[in-house]
Structures are given as C-alpha cells and as structure tokens.
Image (cartoon, grey):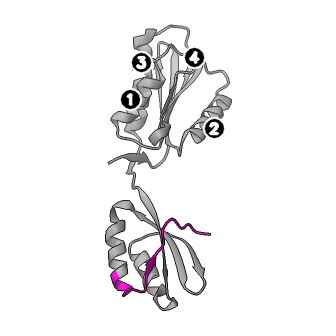
Amino acid sequence: MPFSLARPATYELVIKKSRFIACVESVAGRDEAQARVAQLKAEHPDAAHVCWALLAGGQSAANDDGEPGGTAGRPMLEVLRHQDLQGVMASVVRYFGGIKLGAGGLVRAYTDAVAQALLSAEKVPLIVQTTLACSVPYALEGLVRHELELAQAPLLGVSHGSVVTLHFALPQSQAAEWMARLSESGRGQLVWLEGDSPS
C-alpha cells in the first residue's frame, strides 16, 4: 500500500563542512514541486544547490541542480521509492563547505539526508478515492445522507430539482460494496449517474 506524509519533516547533515538540509513533504504534482523549489531557492540564496526528487504517479522527477549527474536527484528518488511513497517530494539544500566529497560521497550525503528526514516523518496510508453521484426521490435524501455519514464519505455537492442529486467521494476499495448496499436500501428508486460532476 502506498503512503503519503502527514506533514513535512526535515533533517540537517554536516559532512566535511558542507551543510545538507533535507525536507520531505507531500505535494500534488510537478507544478507544486517546482513552486516549492523556487521558494527554497529564495529562502536560501547563498546555497550552492537545491536538489530535489518527486514521486507522484506519472509525474516522477529527479533534479541534480548542478551537482554531478546522478549524484543527488536520482539517489533521493530511490529513497522515496524504497519507502513506497506517493505524492511526496524530497528536497536537499546544500551549502558547500569548500571540500569536495566526490561522486560516492555526494550519493551517500543526499541519500542519508533524505533517509534521516523520513525517519521522523509520519506516514499515512494513501487511500485512492472515487467520486460517485446518484439521484433519488426527495423521500430518500435522508437515507442517503445517513449512509454517507456512517461511511464518513464527504458530500461534494447536492442539487435539488425534480429529484435530489448527490455527489460524494468514497475509498475506491469500498465503492462497489457500498453502492450495492445503497441500491438495495433505495428499493429501485436510486439511480447511479455516470461521469457526472458536482456543479
């Protein structure tokens, strides 16, 4: 099961006078990750490098930011993969201490900084949600709302017309069983809507 992070976690490592400030945090995708990198560069204008790695479905990325190729971004990405994380970005701000570490030393430094930050991070299971919509007669609106409360499913929208249309989200793994139970409770008066979205 993939995990995300409840909140950002940081760790600072000093190796041969170079400071490596690691941060791991949840992000939605590449755009958010790049905005975060820009923010870090603004916060650390004297840093030599701001390297980062992103694991977010099809938007994975690794960036060495001027370090020798493959010594920063990719090792950081491997740490995220090894921890089975999704929607997570690792960044490391490096202040150069004047002593070169060599390729092996850089790989170890970036790997260790991210791994140590992850040790203090609270991991939360990543539950894939699915969005559903149904329409019911007014008499059944209370029943559907009650079932949604029991399932702790967020109500995304309701519209009242000739019938009541409700949009909500459920964990994908529970959707089929829940839909069958609700259909049975609705005694044939509940209609599932395909590809509809809340207005």
Magenta residues, start to end = 184-199
On the question of residue 9 being in view, the answer is: no
Type of residue at label 4?
Gly
Mark 2 burial class by Cα count in 10 Å: few <14, some 14-19, many 20+: few
Labels 2 & 4 near each other (Cβ < 8 A): no
Neighbour tally class for label 3: few under 14, some 14-19, many 20 plus, Cα within 10 Å: some
Determine the CA span between mark 2 and mark 4. Answer: 18 Å
Residue bearing the label numbered 3: 107
Q: Main secondary structure of the magenta part?
A: loop
The residue beneath circle 4 is 66
Label 1: few (<14), some (14–19) or many (≥20) C-alpha neighbours in 10 Å: some
Q: Nearer the viewer, mark 3 or mark 1?
A: 1
Per the image, the residue denoted by label 1 is 78
> Could you say where residue 178 lies in the image, as x and y percent from the top left?
35, 72
What residue type is disc 2 on?
A: Ala
Q: Which residue is mark 2?
A: 35
